[in-house]
Image (cartoon, grey):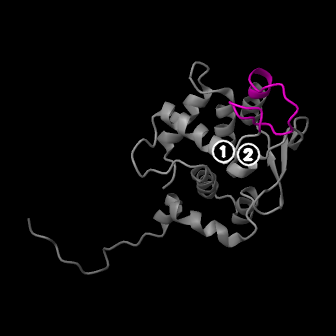
Amino acid sequence: QYLKQNEIISIKKVLNDNNSNISLRNKAIVTLLLYTGLRGCDICNLKLNDIDWENEIIHIIQSKTSVPLELPLTKTIGNSICNYLLYERPKVNIPNIFIREDANYPITRSSIELAIRKVMNEANVRMNAGERRGSHIFRHNIAVTLLEHEVAQPIITETLGHTSPKTLEIYLNADISHLKQCALSIEDFPYMEVQS
């Protein structure tokens, strides 16, 4: 399962709605997921000094691989994080950017999943049983989007922070535009017409 274009539009609408019931923290978390494809564990561990505001870069050491990763800090991401830091984040001496709403501790993976659930509920997307709603669907979306825009696979691998290029293969089955180019015509193959 992957995010459809109409779902992405609905999610972005909620993220940009100043009158929505979604907290600035949850908007910033889902914005990071949507535009960077960062792993949930890396968002939980994101520190204030991981953001280079002057050079517009996010620097992290990935939790899963211990490999450094550098991502662009776009205006959309930067504004979302900045709004949270200025107007909602508790004034506590904790290096993590994202703090739990009910206590002065860094968020956990369950906080990430709750943020996703709240945004998707507000956007009215993925409401049916069995539809994927976790943080990984956003990584999948970044991979597919980059593939559709013909970004070289090594760059996608680096952007997603994979240590092996083979990891990208799991995303290739959702690259519909390129899969269509591989489709074979059945005109040259004999088949029986069904009489109605």
Q: Residue at x 78, y 57 (%)?
A: 63
User: In the figure, 192 relative to 56: above or below?
Assistant: below
Tell me if residue 98 is in the magenta stretch: yes
Residue 104, relative to residue 88: is it above or below? below
Report if residue 73 lies within the magenta region. Answer: no
Q: Badge 2, how many Cα within 10 Å: few under 14, some, many 20+?
A: many
Label 1: few (<14), some (14–19) or many (≥20) C-alpha neighbours in 10 Å: many
* Residue on which the image places disc 1: 33
The residue tagged 2 is 43
Q: Farthest residue toward the bottom?
A: 190
Q: Nearer the viewer, mark 2 or mark 1?
A: 2
Expressed as whole percent of the image width and height from the top left, the position of residue 86 reads 80, 23
Residue that appears at 68% across and 27% down: 24
Element under disc 2: helix
Q: Nearer the viewer, residue 87 or 184?
A: 87
Q: Amino acid at mark 1?
A: Leu
Q: Are marks 2 and 1 in contact (CB under 8 Å)?
A: yes
Q: Nearer the viewer, residue 162 or 96?
A: 96
Taking the spot 30% from the left edge, 80% from the top edge, the residue there is: 189
